[in-house]
Image: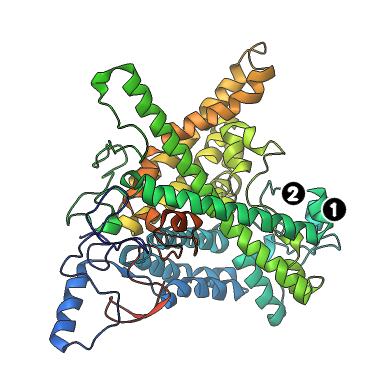
């Protein structure tokens, strides 16, 4: 199989750059002969069309809108059926379509190509949870939101709520609400913990909007700066030669061929522009310290950039919903569930509440986003609770099952994302499979650490240091697959102050030649709207 990029689209210079000799901050890749032109399509002879289609048979093609939507429609249809056994039969075609999308499709947009695989697997696990592992018809309640925007479940009162409706019209909205929610806000199965709004934000929509707008502007400025650093200052590291966006040689092995293999890519990259060259290891301890410091800085920088991107998307969505609620009202019916500002608590933990300083377990359990938490925990919860292993196994074994299960599902989800991006995945999976080991080590240290040691400033700051060290050490394979997958070829901001100041043009078009959300007339292997 050829690379997912090698047969479909080409890399182009960053918008505003002049073509010339490739440098560390500017790379122009000459498309291979089979590259499809991103410009207007000219009429072609039937023989040429047929020949091109034959050449595409061994490579992936863009995911089309109807292919992505069909599994969701099947899930909604299944949940509309009152009979659980009859509804469960739809899991087979649903999983078959998901499997097809995973193996045969991708996206011409680098970050979207990662999202294709990860969300295909996420939806597959979510469907298994709702159709096989649990029964929403008897277990779930949709809880009403009070005048303060809180649910009775949050208030600690008795759960009444709305069970699976008999009325068809009410059932449609009930099922829709269940299918689109990820954290279960306003439901009896709401994940824990949900970062609460501050007292001033909870009391005033104006305060909520003002703070979210300020946050979005700060994140925009940071993403603008960070993407300029990635694509101009440290391009050789973040978009290394041979990445999937810039045509790796045909037949080149994945970055990590299997779970325990070493990387097949070069591990030494030039220093960012403006920094001294990286000395050889023969220079002694200073060279080793310089390499370690540069590696650590790059890992931490990458993590902060990922945090900013994820937070920006949720902040923009919540800000838009609450602004719409201010225009059309958010006090009754569906508006209260989707447009009330209390329905949009933060997706990440709060620094002021200490959510980020509770060790590795607290970092994954409360500080990092919990969008997938319900799906990640579902298999372990089923094994322990539904199969009765919680009563037959020792407490330590149950703890291990509950700990390992979510990270195994997370590893599968991120493996799928790297697979649809550049036919990788083992490097991403390795990172998440290391996390329960770190949590177990942390639990052992906390349990057996002498009281005279684990107190004072050690107790306060050691969790921060431990989390940073562990994530820096274990994240290398994950971030490497993202880099060689071409994910940093994106340009998420439409206007860049830093690119304008550098004289390369303020308007940002990214580096993806073939557009997305465009009609595909079959020249890329399918008919429909490509994502």
**Residue 276 x, y percent position in the rendering:** 33, 31
Query: Mark number for residue 196?
Result: 2
Whether residue 447 is visible, yes or no, is: yes
Q: Which is more toward the observer, 304 or 276? A: 276
Q: Which is more toward the observer, 256 or 341? A: 341
Please identify, in this view, whether the residue under mark 2 or under mark 1 is nearer the observer.
2
Q: CA distance from mark 2 to mark 1?
A: 18 Å
State left or right for residue 210 relative to residue 79: right
State left or right for residue 376 relative to residue 507: right
Display colour scheme: rainbow
State left or right for residue 442 relative to residue 147: left
Query: Mark number for residue 157?
Result: 1
**Residue 146 x, y percent position in the rendering:** 84, 62
Q: Residues within 10 Å of mark 1 (few under 14, many from 20)?
A: few
The disc, 2 or 1, on the residue closer to the chain's N-terminal end is 1
> Considering only vertical position in the picture, is 335 above or below 125?
below
């Amino acid at each position: 199989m050829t690379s997912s990029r090698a047969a479909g689209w080409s890399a182009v210079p960053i918008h505003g750059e002049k073509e010339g000799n490739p440098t560390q901050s500017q790379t122009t890749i000459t498309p291979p002969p089979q590259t499809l032109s991103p410009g207007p399509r000219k009429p072609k002879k039937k023989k040429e069309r047929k020949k091109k289609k034959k050449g595409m048979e061994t490579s992936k093609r863009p995911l089309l809108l109807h292919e992505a939507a069909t599994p969701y429609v099947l899930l909604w249809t299944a949940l509309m059926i009152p009979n659980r056994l009859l509804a469960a039969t739809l899991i087979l075609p649903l999983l078959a379509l998901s499997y097809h999308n995973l193996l045969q499709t991708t996206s011409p947009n680098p970050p979207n190509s990662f999202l294709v695989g990860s969300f295909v697997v996420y939806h597959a696990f979510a469907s298994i949870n709702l159709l096989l592992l649990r029964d929403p018809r008897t277990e779930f309640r949709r809880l009403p939101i009070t005048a303060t925007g809180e649910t009775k479940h949050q208030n600690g009162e008795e759960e009444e709520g709305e069970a699976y409706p008999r009325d068809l019209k009410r059932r449609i909205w009930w099922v829709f609400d269940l299918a689109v929610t990820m954290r279960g806000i306003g439901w009896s199965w709401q994940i824990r913990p949900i970062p609460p709004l501050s007292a001033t934000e909870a009391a005033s929509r104006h305060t909520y909007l003002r703070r979210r707008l300020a946050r979005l502007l700060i994140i925009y400025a940071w993403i603008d700066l960070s993407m300029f650093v990635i694509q101009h200052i440290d391009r050789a590291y973040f978009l290394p030669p041979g990445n999937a966006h810039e045509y790796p040689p045909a037949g080149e092995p994945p970055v990590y061929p299997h779970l325990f293999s070493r990387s097949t890519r070069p591990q030494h990259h030039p220093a960012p522009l403006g920094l001294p060259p990286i000395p050889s290891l023969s220079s002694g301890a200073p060279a080793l310290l310089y390499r370690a410091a540069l590696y650590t800085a790059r890992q931490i920088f990458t993590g902060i950039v990922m945090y900013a991107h994820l937070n920006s998307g949720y902040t923009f969505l919540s800000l838009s919903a609450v602004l719409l609620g201010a225009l059309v009202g958010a006090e009754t019916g569906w508006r209260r569930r989707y447009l009330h500002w209390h329905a949009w608590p933060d997706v990440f933990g709060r620094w002021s509440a200490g959510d980020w300083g509770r060790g590795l377990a607290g970092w994954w359990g409360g500080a990092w986003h919990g969008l997938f938490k319900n799906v990640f925990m579902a298999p372990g919860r089923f094994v322990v609770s539904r199969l009765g292993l919680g009563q037959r196994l020792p407490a330590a074994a149950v703890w291990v099952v509950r700990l390992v299960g979510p990270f195994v599902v997370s590893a599968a989800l991120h493996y799928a994302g790297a697979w649809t991006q550049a036919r990788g995945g083992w490097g991403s999976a390795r990172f998440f499979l290391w996390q329960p080991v770190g949590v177990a080590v942390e639990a052992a240290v906390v349990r057996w650490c002498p009281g005279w040691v684990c107190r004072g400033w050690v107790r306060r700051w050691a969790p921060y240091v431990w989390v940073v060290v562990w994530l820096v050490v274990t994240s290398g394979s994950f971030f490497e697959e993202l880099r060689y997958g071409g994910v940093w070829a994106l340009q998420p901001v439409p206007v860049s102050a830093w690119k304008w100041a550098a004289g390369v043009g303020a308007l940002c078009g990214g580096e993806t030649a073939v557009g997305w959300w465009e009609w595909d007339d079959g020249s890329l292997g399918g008919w429909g709207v490509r994502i």
